[in-house]
Amino acid sequence: MRRIFVFGSNEAGVHGAGAARVAMEKHAAQYGVGVGRTGFCYAIPTKDRRIRSLKLNDIQLYVDEFKAHAHFRPEELFQVTRIGCGLAGYKDEEIAPMFIGCPKNCEFDLAWKPFLGDGYKYWGTY
């Protein structure tokens, strides 16, 4: 199974810090692409083009797009980082529940287990 790194980005695709920088340096994220799939990663915006945090309902729309993408690619394993819980300033309990209903080919940071429960796969803290 090919592993895909899922990270929080900004709509402008400026991958300068945090998991976005890791995505660019280690997983072939394309600079300037802030939404969707590039290289071996998938960008979910948590900030707008001016690098201001998006509203939670806007982030949810991007998460829903990701869920559909993952659903139609069962041959890939999506490693979801704690998007929005670093530089965007949201709390785990605000973001993690957005991922309820993700397909079985998604795995999450162990920090989200209290919010997602036992029905999901987890990986150690990034």
Image (tube, rainbow, N blue to C red):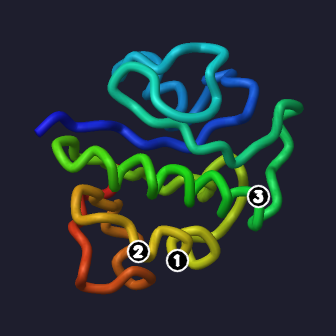
> x, y (%) of residue 88?
71, 51
Q: Is residue 5 left or right of residue 20?
A: left
Q: CA distance from mark 2 to mark 3?
A: 18 Å
How many residues crowd mark 1 within 10 Å: few (<14), some (14–19), many (20+)?
A: some
Q: Provide residue 120's location: percent of width, then percent of height.
A: 25, 73
> Label 1 belongs to which residue?
97
Residue type at mark 3 is Asp
In the picture shown, does residue 18 fall above or below 119?
Answer: above
Q: Please tell me which residue is depicted at 83% across the width and 31% down the height of the picture.
A: 49
| Image coordinates for residue 67, horizontal then vertical, percent | 45, 57
Mark 2 belongs to which amino acid?
Gly
What's the residue at 22%, 37% (across, down)? 3
Q: CA distance from mark 3 to mark 1?
A: 14 Å
Q: Is residue 84 above or below residue 99?
A: above
- Position of 34 relative to 126 (above/below): above
Q: Label 3 belongs to which residue?
A: 58
Q: Secondary structure under badge 2?
A: loop
Q: Secondary structure at mark 1?
A: helix
Q: CA distance from mark 1 to mark 2?
A: 9 Å
- Locate residue 32 relative to residue 41 in the image: left or right: right
Q: Quadrant of residue 125?
A: bottom left
Q: Quadrant of residue 114?
A: bottom left
Question: Of label 3 and label 1, which has the lower sequence position?
Answer: 3
Q: Amino acid at mark 1?
A: Pro
Q: Residue at x 56, y 60 (%)?
A: 64
